[in-house]
Amino acid sequence: MTAKIYVANWKMNVPARESIEQYIGHLKKFRVPANTHIIIAPPFPYLPLVARLIKKSRLEIAAQNVHWETEGTFTGEVSAKMLQRFGVHFVIIGHSERRRDFYETDAIINRKLRIVVHTRLTPILCIGETAAQRKRGETRKIILTQLRRALQGIRNPRVIIAYEPVWAIGTGINAQPTQVQQVHVLIRSWLTRKYTKKNTIPILYGGSAAAHNSHSFMQQPDIDGLLVGGASLSSQQFRNIIQT
Ligand code: PEP
């Protein structure tokens, strides 16, 4: 059975109406069902605090970014090895905000994936089409190109894929669950061909997911979890998303 995964991507924010201690404390009280991962992705400076707070719980942490080298003259950057030392197990790579604002190309994303896999961390690879690309009927082409380029040379299939249509991120506009399911089937069949017939690579959906719609996404057979931005800044809302 594929694991169920819920990721709280705080982006460059901290929870709005509670301290980080309260937030983690609230989530720790939640009985995490078997084969379910709840992953918190705070900004870099908060990783040590969150790592300390989640000790002796089923919660896990992700970084929101990583550099492709292990060390060196890369001002402002953080390596996978450094993240690992702080108890990080997952790294978000290729988020559309990084592609858009930091000009991350598929080639850069591929280099980041390689170092993360090499360090034995699990990448959460984000892919997704823009509104214009969908309108032009290019969704399939964009998704397959991003997948192929990002995973080039990656033989170990210990990755998580997050399908995040760019037009649904932070906009309050949800993709339709059946629309998402279609893309997930496309991703799954590509992964099955590349890696293994018994494909257990989790595929998450991200894009304005919230408590009122999480159930309809999670009912789809090929949606294995959710990557949540805005609604993850409240522990109550994030818990509701997981519970529903
Ligand atoms: C995201 O940050 O990847 C995301 C999906 O954000 P939001 O839930 O706010 O749309």
Image: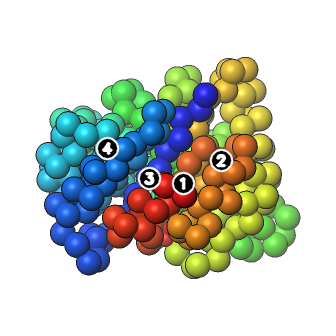
**First in sequence: mark 2 or mark 3?**
3
Rounded to the nearest angstrom, the CA distance separating label 2 from label 4 is 21 Å
Q: Nearer the viewer, mark 4 or mark 3?
A: 4
**First in sequence: mark 1 or mark 4?**
4
Rounded to the nearest angstrom, the CA distance separating label 1 from label 2 is 8 Å
Q: Residue at x 65, y 63 (%)?
A: 165
Secondary element at tag 1: strand
Which amino acid type is marked by label 4? Answer: Leu
Could you tell me if the residues under marks 2 and 3 are in contact, i.e. CB atoms within 8 Å?
Answer: no
Secondary element at tag 2: loop
Which amino acid type is marked by label 1? Answer: Leu
Could you tell me if the residues under marks 3 and 1 are in contact, i.e. CB atoms within 8 Å?
Answer: yes
Rounded to the nearest angstrom, the CA distance separating label 3 from label 1 is 6 Å
Q: Quadrant of residue 199?
A: top right
Secondary element at tag 3: strand
**First in sequence: mark 2 or mark 4?**
4
Point out which mark residue 226 bears. Answer: 1
Q: Quadrant of residue 1?
A: top right
Assign the C terminus to one quadrant of the image. Answer: bottom right
Q: Is residue 191 left or right of residue 109?
A: right
Rounded to the nearest angstrom, the CA distance separating label 2 from label 3 is 13 Å
**Residue for badge 4:** 59
Q: Is residue 43 left or right of residue 196?
A: left
**Residue for badge 3:** 7
Q: Quadrant of residue 237?
A: bottom left
Could you tell me if the residues under marks 2 and 4 are in contact, i.e. CB atoms within 8 Å?
Answer: no
Secondary element at tag 4: strand
Q: Is residue 39 left or right of residue 176?
A: left
